[in-house]
């Protein structure tokens, strides 16, 4: 269990851009009408935003950052650090963060690198940015996070296709002289590598003609080697057992009472899983916002997208408990004391 | 807990079930509305209600309500 404690780091703006195209789960023809209804009720996901084939995560996240630059009084040349959390990078190489440094017009003295994490990635990204800002002579940073997951999901895989939406986010983060505290609890368990996996296309299984062949799985599911495979039961059991335990342990060590937390913002996996976690932690529903109804599981963009729906974060200083968990397996929790966040934005992608 | 309590709670939890229709011998997989989503509903219910984790492997072996009850008792 890796704990990190840092003072004086503040989020100044959170911006998310989603594709314009809305896909409704009640139109998913692979399921009967009753099954569609059950799917929506259980997962909570009514609709999702789906990117065009030529739109990448960086297109969405860069536009999200540009929206914030329009609102906030920051110069592009002042940015010291750019971290891009994604599992759907533009190219095998170079790093998407470095390409984004140039596209955003940031200085060449800017530190830029990718982090290859999914659902836990936003919490990891915040912790890494906070740590670097605190230890170096750096002041301003941007965290880009998100995925275009729908390109990896096969329409004929009902266990994955209806769950995912696409989104790119940008979070502007600054080192200040304030005494507000951020704490992180970061964890990994690679023994669960098969719970969510794209098997082909990396160096372990180089892409070849077999990668494109559709394979049949239980329940009439079909997918190829480039498609995302998700073991719903395994990931469900991991999430509802490990996450409440790790959060309880984290808060005990940080001597923090649940009642002092204003909002518990979870990775948006699916409703039944998130609600099971919430009920086990006995946190009131009012403190647990959801974005999955309209956007689905948006991977590492799900926490910033959900934050942007909580208007109160713009009005008041708040204490947030964040929790990201999933693919890896990887999970991270954060306790963030933050002043009112002046800019919370959600916009449709302008080039669709 | 006895099996009748489990049945009553399951009937409350799963909308499609009419009260009084589930029996210990009911094979959940043969019910016409059964789907993988119901599996998640049951796993979530058992976790919250009895603090018992039903694994994917357990689930494959469960056929009847009695099997589910026996598993909960064994793992409690």
Image: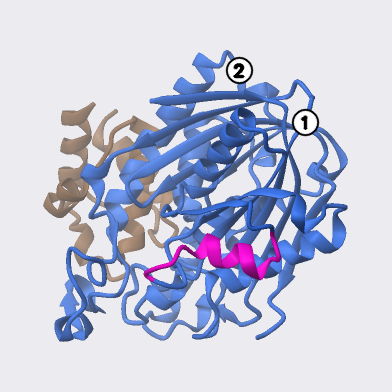
Chain colours: A blue, B brown
Q: Against A199, is B64 above or below?
A: above
| Alpha carbon separation for disc pair 1 and 2 | 23 Å
Q: Against A351, is A91 above or below?
A: above
- Residue extending farthest to the front is A109
> Which disc is residue A256 wearing?
2
> Which disc is residue A176 wearing?
1
Q: Which residues are magenta?
A: A92-106
- Asked whether A116 falls inside the magenta stretch, the response is no
- Asked whether A102 falls inside the magenta stretch, the response is yes
Can the viewer see residue B8? no
Q: Quadrant of the N terminus of chain A?
A: top left
Q: At 38% from the left edge and 52% from the top edge, which residue is drawn?
A: B41
In the rendered image, which quarter is residue A10 located in? Answer: top right
Subunit that carries the residue with mark 1: A
Q: Secondary structure at mark 2?
A: loop
Between residues A262 and A183, which one lies in front from this camera angle?
A: A183
Q: Secondary structure at mark 1?
A: loop
Subunit that carries the residue with mark 2: A
The spot of residue A58 in percent (x, y) is 57, 69
The spot of residue A118 in percent (x, y) is 44, 54
Q: How many marks?
A: 2
Q: Which label sits in the foreground, 1 or 2?
A: 1
């Amino acid at each position: 269990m890796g704990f990190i404690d840092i003072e004086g780091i503040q989020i100044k703006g959170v911006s998310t851009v989603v594709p314009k195209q809305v896909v409704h789960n009640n139109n998913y023809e692979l399921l009967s009408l009753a099954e569609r209804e059950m799917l929506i009720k259980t997962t909570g996901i009514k609709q999702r935003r789906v990117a065009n084939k030529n739109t990448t995560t960086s297109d969405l996240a860069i536009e999200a950052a540009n929206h914030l630059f329009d609102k906030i009084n920051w110069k592009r040349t002042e940015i010291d650090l750019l971290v891009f959390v994604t599992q759907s990078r533009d190219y095998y190489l170079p790093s998407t963060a470095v390409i984004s440094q140039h596209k955003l017009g940031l200085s060449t003295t800017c530190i830029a690198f990718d982090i290859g994490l999914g659902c836990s990635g936003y919490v990891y990204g915040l912790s890494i940015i906070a740590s670097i800002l605190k230890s170096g002579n750096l002041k301003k940073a941007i965290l880009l996070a998100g995925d275009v997951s729908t390109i990896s999901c096969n329409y004929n895989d009902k266990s994955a296709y209806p769950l995912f939406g696409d989104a790119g986010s940008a979070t502007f983060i600054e080192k200040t002289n304030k005494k507000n505290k951020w704490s992180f609890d970061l964890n990994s368990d690679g023994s669960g590598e098969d719970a969510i996996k794209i098997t082909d296309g990396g160096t372990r299984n180089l892409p070849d003609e077999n990668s494109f062949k559709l394979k049949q799985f239980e329940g009439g599911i079909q997918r190829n080697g480039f498609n995302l495979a998700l073991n719903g039961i395994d990931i469900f059991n991991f999430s509802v057992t490990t996450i409440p335990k790790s959060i309880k342990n984290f808060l005990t060590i940080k001597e923090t009472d649940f009642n002092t937390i204003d909002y518990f913002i979870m990775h948006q996996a699916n409703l039944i899983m998130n609600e099971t976690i919430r009920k086990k932690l006995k946190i009131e529903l009012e403190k647990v916002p959801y974005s999955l109804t309209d956007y689905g599981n948006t991977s590492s963009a799900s926490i910033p997208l959900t934050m942007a729906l909580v208007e109160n974060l713009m009005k008041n200083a708040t204490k947030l408990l964040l929790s990201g968990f999933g693919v890896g397996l990887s999970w991270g929790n954060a306790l963030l004391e933050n002043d009112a966040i002046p800019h919370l934005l959600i916009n449709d992608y302008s080039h669709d | 807990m006895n099996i009748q309590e489990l049945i009553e709670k399951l009937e409350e939890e799963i909308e499609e079930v009419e009260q009084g229709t589930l029996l210990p011998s009911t094979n959940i997989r043969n019910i016409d509305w059964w789907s993988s989503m119901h599996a998640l509903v049951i796993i979530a219910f058992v976790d919250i209600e009895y603090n018992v984790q039903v694994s994917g492997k357990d689930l494959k072996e469960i056929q009847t309500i009695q099997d589910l009850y026996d598993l909960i008792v064994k793992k409690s």
